[in-house]
Image: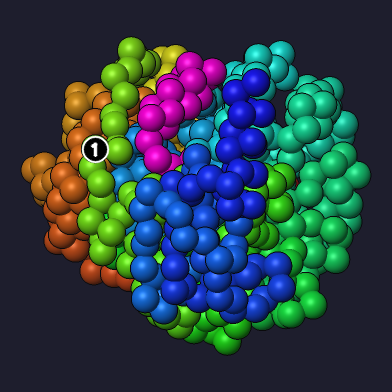
Amino acid sequence: MRKVKQLQERVAVSDLRAAADVIIKNGRIVNVFSGEIMEGDIAIKSGYIVGIGDFDEAAEIIDAKGQYIVPGFIDAHVHVESAMVPPSEFARVLLPNGVTTIVTDPHEIANIAGAKGIEFMLADAAETPLDMYVMLPSSVPATPFEHNGATLEASDLRALYQHEKVIGLAEVMDFPSVASGKTDILQKIVDAEKHGGRIDGHGAGLSKADLNNYLAVGIRTDHESTTAMEAMDRLRAGMFVMLREGTVGRDMIHTLPAVNPKNSHRFCFCTDDKLIDDLLEEGSINYNVRLAIANKIDPVMAIQMATINAATCHKLPHLGAVAAGYQADILFLRDLETVTITKVMKRGEVVVDDGIREESLFKKQDSNFESPAILHTLKLEDLKLEIAGTAANIIGMQPNSLFTEHLVEPITVQNGEFQVSVKDDQLKMVVVERHKGTGCVGVGIVKGFGIRHGAIATTVAHDSHNIVAVGSSDADIMLAIEHITKIGGGIAVVDNGKMAADLALPIAGLLSTQPYEEIQHRLDHLNDAFCGVSAKQGFDPFLTLSFLTLPVIPNLKLTDQGLFDFNVFGFIEVGV
């Protein structure tokens, strides 16, 4: 009956029998359906738009003063954990950037803590103005080629579909299991469809023929396009294509040429993984919109991609438009070129005005979440890399890309052990299993970090989130690993045997308990410290390192079990 009463209230306002809660006047409304700029008063009741026309009676009237009125932006695919803050703090960052809704895949914390991690994220988001919809992790663990902290089978996910914010199955990244028809992954897809959910894809490096397997089982989205041709392949196959611009995955410049007025309704925006410092410096989906406009995409088309297209993609019929019957998530823009946001409304309430948040609306939840312990017994001798021969398979890190190169280069070997070459930028990389104390340690060689003296280490290591480190000496690598173990997870930079900077991430080794302002301060120190040990600039070294352990993205990666070659989908020796 409560829902019926709310509908009766809205109808009463829409036909002028009752007063609205809020009326917005003198705005230029971007109609995402017709592509027009419209005029009219916007009447809002109980958090929903009830009409556009001539309205006068309201508890509050807002004069838009000729500004553009657009729907709140939607991030179609994001991992909150990559910002290293829980959802309650994430909302404080996103809403000033005009992002009023996110669709998230909490598989980072799920790989550590399973369903309890997902429940923590849902509970923490519950009291914030931000709408956080969850796609349940499909691949925990992501592959059988690494050790993680939890396993989520189809039976473990079913109960979570009862939560109103759970809307589908997240990126299906275990493509071989799909292609071979393995029961558990197909059961997860069937369960998601049964509950009316969308199934997200993860088509990194897949051919047109591979995409057919995805489409055949009902997967309808993908965010892994890195070129316009890949975007077109997915579009032609019938997918919604999410154009990504994150911290490492900066793909929009290369994929935007695929968008035109005839097909733009099948494109939306996502960030996937973006650190706090980049969110504060650039923005979130508002940055995607600005970048699209700067690259010749029509402003209204870009706004459609950031709003109604994302809502349609994820079957969220109450979001994405300024129109009767839609949730009153509304942005006031000074202009359509710079996308300068002056006011943000969420469910008809002003949450940000001239960049200032209404802090009383942002409540952090008290949580009983207990982070799993970090378990390992790493010793210095575990870091040795024995190689027979004088050449090696080397991970070629590519700045601002999730992909790596498969390099084969001559190396220095003494007494059968690999020797780091700072001159050739051949550094040692280590992955240490931290969840179950298996003792597994993967050791390999990476090129691209330019570390001259020191090491960096982190417990953020996609997707199993073991400990990953890279450095110029075993002693510095060991010190960095020991430090982040001691502080319960986080990031550390070591410079010539001394701690230079750190950031504690005590929630599962992924998230901080501090306000984002303190995290930004710590990240600044970490970046300064990295500049002190490396000559390489122009990329985020910590997030880049965290993706060098993800075996489902080409080409070479390192897990706690060894060097993984995506193209053969198996392990190979480091030595050639």
Residue 318 as seen in the image, left or right of residue 541 = right
> Between 414 and 529, which is closer to the camera in this rendering?
529
**Furthest-front residue in this view:** 17
Residue at image position (56%, 75%) is 39
Q: Is residue 344 left or right of residue 162?
A: left
The local secondary structure at tag 1 comes to helix
How are the colours assigned in the image? rainbow
Which residue is labeled 1 in the image? 360
Of all residues shown, which one is farthest toward the bottom? 296
Which span is picked out in magenta?
112-131
Q: In this picture, is 213 found above or below 353?
A: above
Residue count near mark 1 (Cα–Cα under 10 Å), binned few <14, some 14–19, many ≥20: few
Q: Residue at x 70, y 67 (%)?
A: 33
Q: Residue, x 78% and y 62% (percent of image)?
A: 234
Hey, what amino acid is under mark 1? Ser
Q: Is residue 453 magenta?
A: no
Q: Position of residue 19 (x, y in %)?
A: 48, 48
122 inside magenta stretch? yes
Q: Where is 252 relative to 43, above or below?
A: below
Magenta stretch: helix, strand or loop mostly: helix
Q: If the image is split into quadrants, where does the N terminus sit?
A: top right
Q: Is residue 381 visible?
A: no
- Please state if 326 lies on the left or on the right of 374 as rendered: right
Identify the image quadrant of residue 219: top right
- Residue 195 pos. (x, y %): 77, 27
Rendered image quadrant of residue 236: bottom right
Question: Residue drawn 44% across and 14% down?
Answer: 436
Q: Nearer the viewer, residue 488 or 419?
A: 488
Look at the image and tell me whether residue 527 can be seen: yes
